[in-house]
Amino acid sequence: MLNSFVKINGSFSDLAKKRFSCRTFDGEGIEEKKLNDIKNILNKENNKFDFFRVGIVDKKILKQKKFFTTGTYGMFKGDRYYIVGILRYKQPFDWVRYGYLMENIIIFLTEKGFNTCWIGGVFDRRGFGSEIGIKDDERVPAVIPFGYCGKKRTLRDKIVRWSAQGDKRKPFEKLFFVENDNHLINENLIKSILENVRIAPSASNKQPWRIFYKSKRFDLYLKRDKLYSKLIPSSDLQMIDMGIAAYHLEQSALEKGSGNLRGTAD
Ligand SMILES: Cc1cc2nc3c(=O)[nH]c(=O)nc-3n(C[C@H](O)[C@H](O)[C@H](O)COP(=O)(O)O)c2cc1C
């Protein structure tokens, strides 16, 4: 669909399975060398797209500078370093492209051994934005804390996870519709590709993606939660979810289909 932002070397399936939302970090931050590596790799790619770039923010410094910052409203603990995803929004499909690229970064960070969490709901958009020198035509739809998960989850973390039912996913049949008309493609292969979409993260775990497979073609649809869209009017979180699903579908098809199933989504 798109060029990725950063390269992934390992197995996409393994990394997708390894990822989960961490909301209680160990409070130790990150080794300096590793942090610099991440900064260097991301900075090198920052001119790749005209509509997307990232910044890295140390929340400790943000807090020192902005005494009144609400950060992430206490929903996270031990968090320190953040990837700030910056979008120059022009048209609705940019949300999808944004989700695709930010999920690529999440999987990249997973490969580097870090835990992460998408944050697109409530966070101090203005604070993070000013820290990375946001321009007038840019916005910050989401940020990603990254580091090492703490051993013990806070009660708040447990409640958030329980309320989003973060460990659960809708049954396969409610999300995906596979029509194997010509019997040329192994149905189990298609199902295993779609399984990697099923485990993708989505805002409030709403899993709004529906996929129809027929004649070597995957069609993605969004089952919108209208009320939910009004909650965070500044970004279209469910379109971002679609970009995340597209990334999982594409990477999985490339890995498992050995090029046989190259997608045409654009
Ligand atoms: C676009 C997007 C925005 C999200 N925003 C938040 C958020 O603001 N706060 C939060 O705690 N989790 C947020 N999440 C994480 C989801 O709640 C989480 O991915 C989902 O519950 C599934 O759990 P898992 O990631 O552990 O598989 C967001 C996820 C996505 C994809």
Image (tube, rainbow, N blue to C red):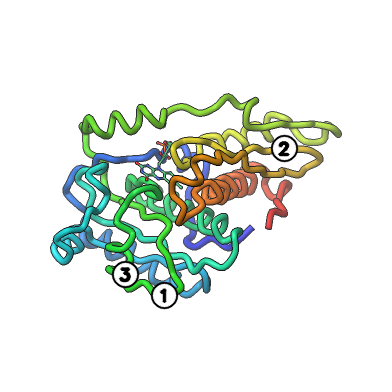
Measured in 3D between alpha carbons, the distance from the residue under mark 2 to the one under mark 1, in whole angstroms, is 39 Å
Residue 32 location, x and y as percent? 21, 61
Q: Nearer the viewer, mark 2 or mark 1?
A: 1
How many tags in the picture?
A: 3
Q: Residue at x 38, y 47 (%)?
A: 121
Q: In this orientation, which residue lies closer to the viewer: 230 or 245?
A: 230
Residue 136 location, x and y as percent? 41, 75
Within 8 Å of ligand 1, the CB of disc 3? no
Q: Are marks 2 and 3 in contact (CB under 8 Å)?
A: no
Instruction: Decide: is 141 above or below 250.
Output: below
Residue 76 location, x and y as percent? 25, 43
Q: Are marks 3 and 1 in contact (CB under 8 Å)?
A: no
Q: Quadrant of residue 74?
A: top left
Residue pointed to by mark 2: 212
Neighbour class for label 2 at 10 Å: few (<14), some, many (≥20)? some
Tell which circle, 2 or 1, labels the residue nearer the N-terminal end. 1
Looking at the image, residue 13 sits to the left or right of residue 37; the answer is right
Neighbour class for label 3 at 10 Å: few (<14), some, many (≥20)? some
Residue pointed to by mark 1: 136
Q: Amino acid at mark 1?
A: Asp
Residue pointed to by mark 3: 132
